[in-house]
Image (tube, rainbow, N blue to C red):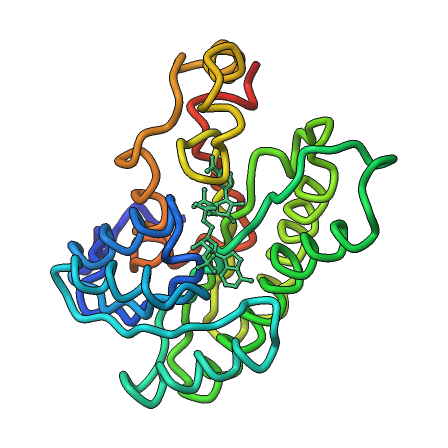
Amino acid sequence: MSIQLPDSFPASSSVAGRRVVLTGASGGLGRVLALAFSQGGARVALVARNQGALEKLAGSLPGESLICQADVSNAADNDRVAEVVTQAWGGIDTWIANAGISPVLESVLDMSPETWRQVQQVNLDGVFHGARAAASQMIGVGQGGRIVVTTSVLAERPRQGLSAYSVSKAGATALVKALAMELGSHGITVNAVAPGWFDSPLTSFWTRNLNRSKEITDHTAIGRWGLSEDLPGVYLFLASDASAFVTGSVLTVDGGYLCL
Ligand SMILES: NC(=O)c1ccc[n+]([C@@H]2O[C@H](COP(=O)([O-])OP(=O)(O)OC[C@H]3O[C@@H](n4cnc5c(N)ncnc54)[C@H](OP(=O)(O)O)[C@@H]3O)[C@@H](O)[C@H]2O)c1
């Protein structure tokens, strides 16, 4: 291997001017990601079901944004979002499939088939629909692109009471790897970000209770929960030129939760 580097090295880690679709934008992690990309100069299409929350978020961002009310578990909604953004901005550079739910904490024996399906429909089918919609537009425009999927450390270490959620995230991780192989020749990279434990409505069962919260802290190498500023860096990296040769990977942001 040559030790020479091109004059263009190091590749830019900037997302300025990037056209980014972000699902789950109205939630705890989504709002942080929206702000990070917006502060980085990206245009952000904000996707979720709660129109009012999206409008409030859009009003607080420093840069340009689009509001796209949509249900990610619905294929047609994803197609519509991809078309609207492509029409408005001429293409999509990065699609972040971040929407997710974890509605129950119950054993497999207690869980209804309806609840199981609901979780798969949002967390797994939603990624499938979104990636298909994004890749179709990216291939049509012909400039490549980035797909980033928010999975979870529970994909690798399922927890009791969270079987449906853990399985949905493990499935999404497998889908990321399959998509990476299928889309690489089109210049599209596909990666997962697996967060550890961050304070959000999704994790309120743990944050509400000191002992439960401490259990997480005690099982995290860095000894604390994730903070807002801990998360966006890897998403910005995966959306930038600096990650051009990274695909099919899972970037874990968990303060060492999986080490212990
Ligand atoms: N917080 C953590 O510690 C943690 C750890 C690992 C992974 N994650 C993952 O990170 C992602 C974001 O989680 P969070 O903590 O920000 O959760 P959250 O605060 O509960 O937010 C969830 C987001 O997903 C959206 N959403 C839910 N169902 C949807 C649907 N059918 N269609 C469109 N949007 C939908 C919600 O918006 P609407 O209700 O308005 O639709 C909301 O914006 C999820 O994929 C989650 O699994 C979180």
Q: Residue 75: where, in percent of width, then height?
A: 61, 77
Query: In the rendered view, does 222 fall on the left or right side of 212?
Result: left
Examine the rendered structure and indicate whether residue 211 appears above or below residue 187: above
Name the residue nearer the viewer: 46 or 12: 46
Query: In the rendered view, does 87 fall on the left or right side of 14?
Result: right
Q: Give the residue at x 82% y 47%.
A: 112
Q: Residue 66: where, in percent of width, then height?
A: 28, 74
Q: Give the residue at x 35% y 71%.
A: 93
Query: What is the total number of numbered labels drawn onto the structure image?
Result: 0
Q: Give the residue at x 36% y 44%.
A: 234
Q: Residue furthest left?
A: 62
Name the residue nearer the viewer: 223 or 10: 223
Confirm whether residue 136 shows in the render: yes
Q: Residue furthest right?
A: 109
Name the residue nearer the viewer: 12 or 64: 64
Q: Residue 154: where, in percent of width, then height?
A: 62, 34
Q: Residue 58: where, in percent of width, then height?
A: 22, 64
Name the residue nearer the viewer: 224 or 18: 224
